[in-house]
Image: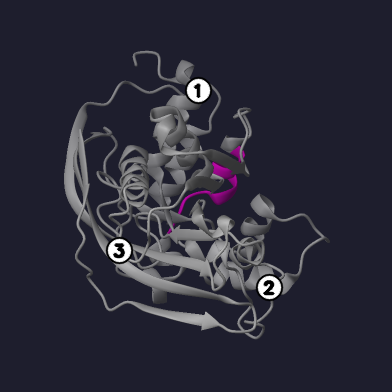
Amino acid sequence: MYIAIALALLRPVFGYTDTTSGYSCTSFVLPVTVTNVTTWIFPETLFPNGYAATAFANTITQRGFQSALPPLSSVTATYNISMQYCTPATPSPRAKILQILSHGLGFDKRYWDFRLPHATSDQGYSYIRTALSYGYSTLSYDRLGCGDSSAPDPYTEVQSLVELEILISLTKSVKTGTLPHISAPDKILHIGHSWGSELTNALAATDPSLTDGIVLTGYSHVFQYELMFVSNSAFHLASENQPERFGDRSSGYLTWGDKYDNQYCYLQYPYFDPEVLDYAESTKYPFTGKSFLIFLYCAFPDIFPSW
């Protein structure tokens, strides 16, 4: 398996400097090429409509669900990955410690710099601004299919091993100082949330030399509650749920139904600001059902008896 990242920019670089808080951020999109990454070909047909997607969620959460081993394939492709690099304006030893941030399902990289539209200067919800205030640098990115990154075939390409190789590729480029706009750091920390924590943990397990430390949030080795997320989301088609944003997306891109489903998964009433929930719902991003089958195999191998 070979991973490479091209160094040519696809879009103009833009950034901003916050003179009050004393930091600067640069946003850019880079082509990342993955070569011969193993993928799985699932026997299920493509979802013809939302009814079929919801029925699929029902099937994989039923007691006694079992599935046969799908054939393997591989993907070689180039994806545009959107990133944001932030660093304190004042040089310090901590500024040479870079945190690579991987967001979870249903979000894009704004998860790490969450700000309500009418309160953009409010730092209360921004992890990035907090990290910068302590002198650290950060690199956040949109996972495949999210934000400004590529949204390829959700059935055959947006799978966990492809996402993992993208994270590995970015890390290697940062570590060797070959990623544009970022000088090689002294140390690299990987921070994840939910699905991003799964990828972060997988990176550390695959090649421990790539990271100097990991932080896993929204994460546990107790997996039996993961099926509640599937049941709650019920696998709505993103193209039907938010047609103004995702009307051109394939039926393989899924989401939960509404803000109350979002609340069920992430927020405890009454200890949250409803405005935060409304904004999170309006800016959510879809996920793919096939990634869930891969996760189920890793978490519950007994439900795939022939694997």
Task: Residue 123: give its label.
Answer: 2
Q: Of the residues shown, which amino acid type is indicated by label 3?
A: Pro
Residue identifier under label 1: 300
Q: Nearer the viewer, mark 2 or mark 3?
A: 3
Between 96 and 107, the residue placed more toward the observer is 96
Gap between marks 2 and 3, in whole Å?
27 Å
Q: Is residue 296 left or right of residue 46?
A: right
Image quadrant occupied by the N terminus:
top left
- Image: magenta residue range: 228-237
Sooner in the amino-acid sequence: mark 1 or mark 2 = 2
Image quadrant occupied by the C terminus:
top left
Sooner in the amino-acid sequence: mark 3 or mark 1 = 3
Q: Residue at x 76, y 69 (%)?
A: 273
- Vertical comparison of 83 with 96: above or below: below
**Considering the numbered disc 3 on the image, is that residue within a helix, a strand or a loop?**
loop
* Residue 87 % position (x, y): 51, 67
Task: Residue 180: give its label.
Answer: 3
Residue 41: tell me if it is visible. no
Among the 4 quarters of the image, the one containing residue 263: bottom right
* Residue 132 % position (x, y): 60, 65
**Considering the numbered disc 1 on the image, is that residue within a helix, a strand or a loop?**
loop
Among the 4 quarters of the image, the one containing residue 85: bottom left
Q: Is residue 119 left or right of residue 88?
A: right
